[in-house]
Image: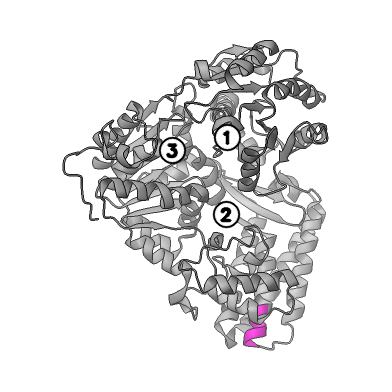
Amino acid sequence: MSVLRMPVLATSAEILGPEGPLKKILPGFQWRIAQQQMAQRIEDTIQHTGELIAESGPGTGKTLAYLVPAMLSGKKTLISTGTKHLQDQLYHRDIPLVQKALALSIRVALLKGRSNYLCLDRFKRTRLQRQNLTSAHDEQLEYIASWVSRTSVGETNEATEIPEDASIWQLVTSTNDNCLGAKCEVFEECYVNQARKNAIKADLLVVNHHLFFADVALREEGFGKLLPGVECVIFDEAHQLPTIASNFLGNSIGAHQILELCRDTRAEEARERSQVANLESSLGECERRITELRLALDDSNSRIEWHEVYKRAKFRSALSKALQAIGGLSEVLRESAAVGEGLTRCCNRCEDLHSRLYEMSEDLRDGDHIRWVETTARGFRFHETPLDIGRTLRALLHHQNKSWIFISATLSVAGDFNHYQRQIGVADVDTQRWDSPFDFQNQAILFIPDGLPDPRDASFVARMMESTLAVLEASEGRAFLLFTSHRAMQEAYDMIGGLGEFEVLVQGVAPKRELLDQFRERRRALLLGTASFWEGVDVRGDALSCVVIDKLPFESPDDPVLRARLRAIEEMGGNPFMDYQLPTAVISLRQGTGRLIRDVTDRGVLMVCDPRLLSKSYGKLFLRSLPPMPITRDLQTVTRFIQDTVR
């Protein structure tokens, strides 16, 4: 890695100092002692190939605190972020700023998952076989054709005229299942292939957690060559790692994969023409059996332990017939595969899906995993998830001779990192906290309304909204209402959506980024959201002056993975509530709280409507974990604070 260092400033702390080069080039740069200290600690960790868990409160400037030492280190570094949006921000804004300020000459690359890149082969095939497409798809294909002539990287988010959730993207992007790899006719021009080549050559690579764990789990060729050469890995928004790793480091198979195989097989048959007599009937039989299997599950939008589902005779029968249908399709595809590479690939996929579904259908007895079923309105997915994700992560990450750095604003519980360390499988590792420089004593107030019922009471949401409306009137809207469930969010929306006093935006009616843009632009706006709005959302200034949280964010006791993990903790002699449920909820509440104060000039009210915060002994742990701000139960005190400080 070629790095041109500044001639005088030798350390990251000096570069981030009050007279450093970033001050001259970065608009609004503010010297922060916590940022300097954090950067120096990260620099030392990288130099000594160590491990560090670093908690950095809002406003400390954590991005520059890890970018500067990483880019100066001379080591090949991988940075993994929480979202694709943060990836883009790092790659297109933050990294170029540091490069310019420090005159650094390093190779930087951005790598996303397959679905973020146009597949030239599937795009070509879709255009040739468009007889079954809608007129909207036809128009979108022509727009993509025009865009292809201009793009150099093929990232679908560049095609701004087509929504990111448009169904056309499923037809013109690839998955690990349907990609032909090196046997593809346009492999050398492939955008994914080009992105991976750039990634392997890069001195600094930016990915996201989903891609990191998905590709590690799949052992895909491109990423498999990449990680061994990396000398330093930095996880930003590292609090997300246990959940994301759980989703990817197990095993899963769903209806969508099987139905997509059937669709792709028809497309390949139309192109390669095996003309095997019973191929179409086998595809139809497979699709029917998958539909019947979904109907046999009954439940919609639920998560159920496998043994509960397997008790049902109707489900066992439907599963057996689905396995027979997929097995029958495999036999037919073996005959069809002789005519071409596309049908050969479909045959291999079918055999793999049949094998995995068969393994899923058997009893699980190893005690290290939980098997469960997830249903949606039209589909299903069978999962096998590690019970102890910490042990899995320890085996995956910590045996390699690399620097591992975990960074987030919320990793500790009342200053203690033990819970997070257990989650990622490390005991003996350096930890450090840097508090936010914001003056929460004067910038914010915590309002815990008096007289509300227990959150389990049927009247809770209605009573909560009565208390909330008085605060919203005082703040003139400008509020996030964060809920722990979609049901509660919808009930609240039904109460205030038609009042006309506020501009009410609700999660699900538009993409997240569009909702946030509307919220910033409109007066007296309210935004109602669930989990995805509790973190990774940054609204500064007067647009946001109040954050309302309905209740303490304990995970649903009905979740099958949670139930299994709690049982395992109890069987080992631990306390499931104190060891897992409570610290997890504390970190989630800290994330929601972090939406309120995002700058030194921000002012606002945090309203937590759960009386258990004061009535239960464990409420003290939540309060000790929140920023130090005044607490009140008096509405008039809140109103005066808004009038004197916020408005």
Q: Looking at the figure, which quarter contains the C terminus?
A: top right
Measured as percent of width and height from the top left, residue 586 is found at 56, 26
Q: Does residue 271 show up magenta in the picture?
A: yes
Distance from disc 2 to disc 1, alpha carbons, whole Å, reads 20 Å
Q: Secondary structure at mark 3?
A: loop
Q: Secondary structure at mark 2?
A: strand
Label 2, on which residue? 251
Measured as percent of width and height from the top left, residue 369 is found at 57, 45
Q: Secondary structure at mark 1?
A: helix
Report the side of 315 relative to 381 (left or right).
Answer: right
Q: Are circles 2 and 3 on residues that touch, CB within 8 Å?
A: no
Q: Which sits in the foreground, 7 or 427?
A: 7
Q: Is residue 401 visible?
A: no
Label 3, on which residue? 425
Distance from disc 2 to disc 3, alpha carbons, whole Å, reads 20 Å
Query: In the rendered structure, which segment of residues is drawn in magenta?
Result: 267-273
Identify the residue at horizontal 58%, vertical 80% (top origin).
Answer: 342
**Dot 2 or dot 1, earlier in sequence:** 2
**Dot 2 or dot 3, earlier in sequence:** 2
Query: Which picture quadrant has residue 227?
Result: bottom left
Q: Looking at the figure, which quarter contains the N terminus?
A: bottom left
Q: Which sits in the foreground, 572 or 397?
A: 397
Measured as percent of width and height from the top left, residue 329 is found at 69, 75
Q: Amino acid at mark 2?
A: Asn
Vertical placement of residue 130 versus 239, above or below: below
Q: Amino acid at mark 3?
A: Gly
Identify the residue at horizontal 48%, vertical 36% (top origin).
Answer: 423
Q: Residues within 10 Å of mark 2 (few under 14, many from 20)?
A: some
Mark toward the viewer: 2 or 1? 2
Identify the residue at horizontal 64%, vertical 72% (top origin).
Answer: 141
Label 1, on which residue? 568
Query: Which picture quadrant has residue 547?
Result: top right
